[in-house]
Image (cartoon, rainbow, N blue to C red):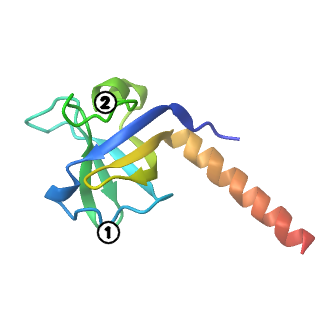
Amino acid sequence: MGTIHKNYFLTITGLNHYYGMKPIEIGKILTLVKDKNNEYDEEAIAVLLPYIGTIGYVANSPNTVVKGTSSAGRIYDIFEEEAYAQVLFATKESAICVLILKEDLLNLMEDFLKEDLTNRKLN
């Protein structure tokens, strides 16, 4: 089974600059993409949803990183271009997520599909 990097919890911030908390749902998988052209932060990681685009950023400031979560700078070199995060819970202005690497998400999906097919055969 794929590995969810439970030792990497993330704060998603800046949501109010985009769509607010509307797109945030517990369990939802968000796409993390390095924003290499960000003029304010050379370790910026944008948070995206399909059909919507950017909804926020992985927090990278001592003022926005919730205690117990990792900053964008801390996880920046863990993945190439893209990774994922699953929403665990939301606060008034941010979301706390767990990091999932691309290859681990593919393994999790494969395991889910195998389990689903096994359950269909049993029924």
Residue 90: x and y, percent? 37, 54
What kind of element bears circle 1? Answer: loop
Residue type at mark 1 is Tyr
Closer-to-camera residue (9/91): 91
Dot 1 or dot 2, earlier in sequence? 1
Residue 85: x and y, percent? 44, 46
**Disc number at residue 51?**
1
Residue 39: x and y, percent? 8, 36
Residue extending farthest to the left is 39
Residue shown at 71% from the left, 60% from the top: 113
Residue extending farthest to the bottom is 123
Residue shown at 13% from the left, 39% from the top: 38
**Disc number at residue 27?**
none
Mark 2 neighbour density, 10 Å: few (under 14) some (14–19) many (20 or more): many
Of the 4 image quadrants, the one containing the N terminus is top right
Left/right of residue 12 with respect to residue 20 in the rendered view: right
Residue shown at 22% from the left, 40% from the top: 35
Left/right of residue 41 with respect to residue 7 in the rendered view: left
Residue 58: x and y, percent? 29, 41
Marks 1 and 2, how far apart in space?
26 Å
Tell me where residue 54 sits by quadrant.
bottom left
Of the 4 image quadrants, the one containing the C terminus is bottom right
Tell me where residue 3 sits by quadrant.
top right
Residue extending farthest to the right is 122
What kind of element bears circle 2? Answer: loop
Q: Is residue 48 above or below residue 102?
A: below
**Disc number at residue 71?**
2
Residue type at mark 2 is Ser
Q: Is residue 71 above or below residue 46?
A: above
Residue shown at 85% from the left, 62% from the top: 118
